[in-house]
Image (tube, grey):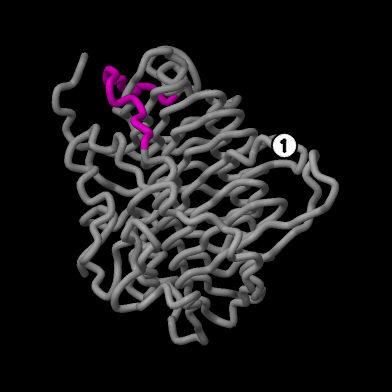
């Protein structure tokens, strides 16, 4: 098999064999939404301005194929709204040598520094956090080369910019308002890539309070209820500025919020969402969701798109959000109705190109195998500043 858009390890990491065994048969009833003729499964999609690559062959697009060639190749390479995030590209290399919660050589010590840093790990194991670990601006947390799992609490990106989080695991966060990754308030230029997240008391990733210009890619979400919230409350009218891209992610039996959106603009493409417990995607007050070439495979619950009506604090009338579906694949009786598709933003008005494949069995298999933490070597750092 030729791999596109992600770099898998040669040997399956722990859990990948189970993902293969649990892969569902594709013979169930399906349909593709061909809104306005935008998708030809053999030719790809045209975004109305910028060309969206993809189409019949799984080798035609090579999304992020080069980012593991050198350590800092990640910087500035995200697609979508978070594409300008450079993380700690211009900073020194900081090596985590301790799995302790705090102190010299710990992840917390590196994340609180004011200067740009590219943070890597010399150890593998569990970091048990007793409180949120706050990440300051211009940081890359790069888990390649080791296996790091954060437990107890999560990461907090508060009033920061230019942060990249790559190849980590998040599990078992406990406490009120404890998310795996909490992005609020007013943070921007964030890229979360190739992470595995599960089993937190609140959300896995929450994006609220005016945080924007964010991309979430190649992540695996599982064993969880309220997966991803974008916009926390109808009184937070500043969330009209929120813009998020979510692509090539695997929502694996999680209950709801893939994502749930208030106010913001969200571009979903080439994600695989299966066996949700309530709904797949929810559009609430004034939100605009562009769902493009995703795979929605229903279990017992069939409603893929849900609409909730709320009243913005500065409006007199209640409203829900809008969803436009282009080229999505709906399996096993998944039900999706578009609402206000003409009111949804056009992605090419915000970024010129993005990489998308036609939804297919091959894409579904790749997403299952290559999303989340991967057992890959840490690339060399050319020109390390020590």
> Residue 242, percent across and down?
57, 41
State which quadrant residue 207 falls in.
top right
Q: Is residue 22 above or below residue 26?
A: above
User: Is residue 94 shown in magenta?
Assistant: yes
> Residue 263, percent across and down?
66, 46
Farthest residue toward the right?
Answer: 316
* Residue at figure coordinates x 56%, y 49% from the top left: 265
Closer to the camera, 239 or 13? 239
Q: Which residue is mark 1?
A: 236
Report the label total.
1
Q: Which residues are magenta?
A: 84-99
* Residue at figure coordinates x 56%, y 34% from the top left: 211
Residue 92 visible in image: yes
Farthest residue toward the left?
Answer: 382
The C terminus lies in quadrant: top left
Q: Main secondary structure of the magenta part?
A: loop
């Amino acid at each position: 098999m030729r791999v596109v858009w992600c770099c898998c390890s040669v040997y399956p990491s722990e859990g990948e064999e189970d993902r293969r065994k649990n892969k569902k048969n594709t013979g169930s009833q399906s349909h593709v939404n061909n809104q306005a003729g935008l998708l030809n499964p053999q030719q790809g999609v045209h975004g109305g301005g910028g060309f969206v690559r993809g189409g019949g062959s799984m080798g035609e697009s090579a999304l992020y194929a080069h980012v593991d060639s050198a350590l800092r190749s990640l910087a500035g390479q995200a697609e979508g709204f978070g594409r300008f995030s450079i993380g700690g590209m211009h900073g020194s290399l900081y090596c985590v040598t301790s799995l302790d919660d705090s102190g010299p050589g710990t992840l917390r010590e590196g994340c609180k520094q004011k200067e740009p840093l590219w943070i890597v790990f010399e150890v593998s194991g569990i970091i048990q956090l007793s409180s949120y670990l706050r990440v300051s601006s211009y940081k890359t947390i790069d888990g390649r080369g080791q296996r790091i799992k954060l437990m107890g609490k999560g990461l907090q990106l508060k009033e920061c910019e230019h942060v990249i989080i790559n190849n980590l695991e998040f599990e078992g966060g406990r406490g009120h308002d404890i998310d795996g990754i909490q992005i609020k308030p007013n943070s921007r230029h964030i890229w979360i890539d190739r992470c595995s997240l599960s089993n937190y008391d609140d959300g896995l990733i929450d994006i609220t309070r005016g945080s924007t210009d964010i991309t979430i890619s190649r992540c695996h979400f599982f064993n969880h209820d309220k997966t991803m919230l974008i916009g926390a409350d109808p009184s937070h009218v500043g969330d009209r500025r929120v813009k998020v891209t979510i692509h090539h992610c695997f929502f694996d039996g999680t209950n709801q919020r893939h994502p749930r959106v208030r106010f913001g603009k969200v571009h979903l493409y080439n994600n695989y969402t299966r066996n949700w417990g309530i709904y797949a995607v929810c559009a609430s007050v004034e939100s605009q969701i562009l769902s493009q070439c995703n795979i929605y495979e229903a279990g017992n619950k069939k409603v893929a798109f849900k609409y909730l009506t709320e009243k913005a604090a500065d409006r007199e009338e209640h409203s829900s959000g809008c969803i436009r579906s282009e080229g999505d694949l709906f399996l096993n009786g998944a039900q999706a109705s578009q609402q206000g598709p003409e009111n949804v933003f056009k992605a090419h008005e915000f970024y010129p190109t993005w990489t998308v494949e036609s939804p297919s069995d091959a894409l579904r298999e790749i997403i299952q195998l290559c999303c989340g933490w991967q057992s890959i070597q840490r690339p060399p750092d050319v020109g390390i500043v020590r």
